[in-house]
Amino acid sequence: VLIVLIYGSLSHHFLAGLLERVVAADRHGHRRPSLGEVVRGLPWARLIVADLVLTALILAGLAAFVVPGLVVMTWFAVVLPLVNLERRPVPATFARSYHLVRGHSWRVAFVAVTAFAIPEIVIAVVAIATHTGNVALDALVHAIPAVILLPLSALPIVIMAFELVALDAGAASGRTKV
C-alpha cells in the first residue's frame, strides 16, 4: 500500500511535469520531449517540497473552517507547474503564484476546485462501491483510481499556469511601454 501511495504521489509530479513540458513545447513550436528527458529534467526535490508545503497549507486552511483552505488552494493553484516552468526556489514560486492569481481569483478557484473535486468524487464513488472491509484491499482499491485520475487533473492547472504567465508578461510589456 505504501508503494502504491508513493507511486501515486510521484506519478502526479511526473505527469504534471510531463504535461508542462508537452504544453510548453507545443506553445513554443518545439519538439516534444521524450519521457527520459522529462524524468531527468524535472526538479524533483523542489516539486516534492512545494507539494508538501502546499498540502500542509491547504489542510491547515481547510481545518480552519474550509474557506481559508479554498483561498490557499486558489492563491497557490499554479505552484507545481511554476516550479517546473520557471525553476525558481520554492518560496519564490509561492510568491509568484500569488502574484499571477491576483486579479483572476474566481476563475482560478473554479478551475482548481473543479480539477480537484471531480477526481475525488469519482474516487469516493469507487471506494464506496467496492468497499470490502479489508483495510489493505480498500486502500489499494482507492489508490488505483487515484493514481489514474489525479495526475490527469493536473492538465487544466498546467494550462491555467501558462495562461496566467502569458497575461502577466503582456501586462508587464504594457507597463514598460509608457
Image (cartoon, grey):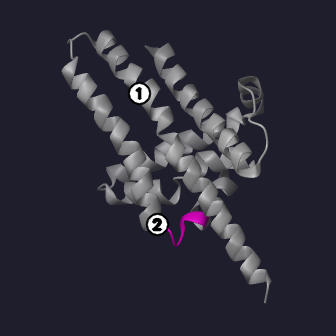
Quick one: SS at disc 2?
Answer: helix
User: Considering depth in this image, is 104 or 55 the residue closer to the camera?
Assistant: 104
- Residue 141 position, x and y percent, is 33, 16
**Vertical arrangement, residue 138 with respect to residue 147, above or below:** above
N-terminal of the pair, mark 2 or mark 1, is: 2
Image point 50% across, 33% down: which residue? 151
Image quadrant where residue 52 sits: top right
> Which residues lie in the magenta part?
100-105
How far apart are labels 2 and 1 at the CA level? 27 Å
* Amino acid type shown at disc 2: Ser
**Observer able to see residue 88:** no
Place of residue 93 in the rendered image (x, y in percent of width and height, measured from the top left):
66, 54
Residue 104 on the magenta span: yes
From the viewer's side, name the closer residue of 169 and 63: 169
Q: Can residue 169 be seen in the rendering of this structure?
A: yes
Task: Provide the residue designation for mark 1.
Answer: 146
Judging depth in this view, the residue of 55 and 84 nearest the camera is 84
Q: What kind of residue is marked 1?
A: Ala
- Residue under the image location 47 percent in, 60 percent down: 108
Q: Residues within 10 Å of mark 2 (few under 14, many from 20)?
A: some
Q: Quadrant of the C terminus?
A: bottom right
Residue 47 is drawn in which quadrant? top right
- Find numbered disc 1 in the image and state the secondary structure of the residue it sits on: helix
- Name above or below for residue 63 compared with residue 105: above
Rate crowding at label 1 as few (under 14), some (14 to 19) or many (20 or more) other CA atoms within 10 Å: many
Residue position for label 2:
105
What quarter of the picture does the N terminus occupy? Answer: top left
Residue at the location (56% across, 40% down)? 51
Q: Are marks 2 and 1 in contact (CB under 8 Å)?
A: no
Count of marks placed on residues: 2
94 vs 111, left or right, is right
Q: Residue at x 20, y 12 (%)?
A: 133
